[in-house]
Image (tube, grey):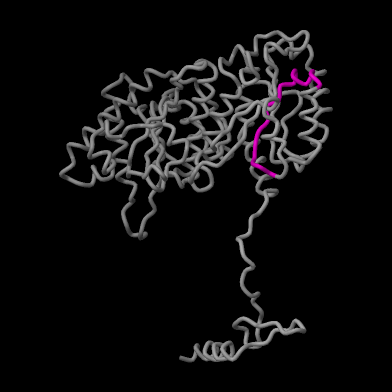
Amino acid sequence: MHGSVGAGEDEQKPYFFLSYAHTPKSDPKDKDPNLWVQRFFRDLCAHVMQLTSLPAGSAGFMDQQMQPGEGWQERLSEALAFCKVFVPLYSPRYFLSEQCGREWFAFSSRAAVQNTRTNGNSGNPVTGVVPALWVPVPPRQLPQAAERLQFNHATFGDEYADEGFYGLIKLNYLRDQYERAVYRLAKRIVSVAQQNELEHGDPHQDYAKVPPAFGPTGGPARDMEVSVLACSRSTLPTGRSPDCYGSEALNWNPYHPASSRPLADHTVDVVRNLNYAVHLSDFEAEPQRLLASGAPGPGLLLLDRWALDARRRRDLVDQLCATRRPWISVMVPGNVEDPENRSRGEELAQQTDVVLAGRIDDSDGHRTPSAGLPTLEAFSKAIPGAVKAAVRHFEAHAPTYPPPGSGGPMPRVLPNGIGYGISDSGGRGHSTDQDKNYGDKAEGSSDD
């Protein structure tokens, strides 16, 4: 795979990452239909270079072609880890592409961690995503991750909003509008890059294991329950400082001071990037959301090990584990930098093991280690696996709802192999004259 980036240090640090869905050829003899995307990419890079002081060749990254012997997954992971802005090129194919979904999720995870580290509860979360229209996509076809951006494409011009870059670049009479829209997109990329200094991601992440952000088909968001069982500042056990807590359980921030946001808010962001509609709840205040009989829906329980000091909270977890509810994944944060966690870590882990003893293996439901996930990054990387396990168990245990009515007659194999038999009192099937005539016609039809 060839990335359009510079040499040396800049080879791993493109300014923006262009994510697009490849269009297949209608005929092997046809020209590459993605040549127009490559031209658009070159034009966009040229404008970005004029608007910045970037070194030659470092404006953008685009997967242009496979190169023999090149580790394309490694190159892709590096570009997603270091780029400042992510530019998804919308088209009907884009949100059906698993690769595009992986690229989106990998970059969005960086933004989610950044927000949790630095932005607190501000109303302006960093996304670093600047969408562009290749072909306009109806709003109803947008997955939740894209729908939440609320980007007004008409600010780049009405013709652009109606036609997308593909229409502008292909129609000669819209050439001026194309140039204007590309320039405005370049300005937007530079503005976002300068306003939001994203921390670098992990360039060595296993790209093949990154989950797609748009769900299995890029369709509507699915439901996911996220519930928290944690202390508040008024219910802390003896010896626990209030630094990680707030006035209610949903304020719990176990990775303080590295994190400035509640863990629940961070988890909701990551799960939404997996294309789920999330309901957030306090397990102690709304236990029925997880303890309802049957399989009401997949979910995550974020468990504060310090909260298990209270009997009423241990009883809630006992109820959760008393009946098999494998569609609820349990996640246990730790924080290796917390001195109180370090001093009482073994005791906390043992108590958590006792409470979760009913979850012996994965068939009983997913759970992270009782020793706790040591960092925010480790917790973030564990979320997709916990979500996937919860959904898998839910789909295996969810009740089915057959259509109303008694249904039609059961089909039976007749002597000639065609038609519906009618059971006699002995349970044997026999055919009607209509069945026989149909069978004779079908049997001889191959000679027509």
Q: Is residue 186 above or below residue 326?
A: above
Quick one: 117 or 47, which is closer to the camera? 117
Count of all numbered marks drawn on residues in the image: 0
* Residue 441 vertical position relative to residue 188 in the rendered view, above or below: below
Q: x%, y% of residue 421?
A: 65, 83
94 left or right of 240?
Answer: left
Horizontally, is 43 left or right of 254 in the view? left
Q: Is residue 143 above or below residue 252?
A: below
Q: Which residues are magenta?
A: 295-311
Q: Is residue 181 magenta?
A: no
Residue 194 occupies quadrant: top left
**Most extreme residue toward the left, as rendered?**
173
Residue 356 location (% of width, % of height) = 80, 31
Question: Which residue is drawn at the image coordinates 75% and 21% (left, top)?
Answer: 305
Instruction: Give how far across and how far down residue 233 sits, in percent.
Output: 68, 11
- The image quarter containing residue 262 is top right
**Nearest to the observer: residue 55 or residue 197:** 197
Q: Residue at x 18, y 40 (%)?
A: 175
Identify which residue, 421 or 211, lies in the foreground: 421
Assign the N terminus to one quadrant of the image.
Answer: top left
Q: Position of residue 105 (x, y in %)?
A: 51, 34
From where the camera sits, is residue 71 visible?
no
Write the residue at 29% across / 38% down.
40
Query: Which quadrant does the C terminus fall into?
Result: bottom left
Q: Is residue 297 magenta?
A: yes
| Residue 21 shows in the view | yes
Q: Is residue 46 left or right of residue 253?
A: left
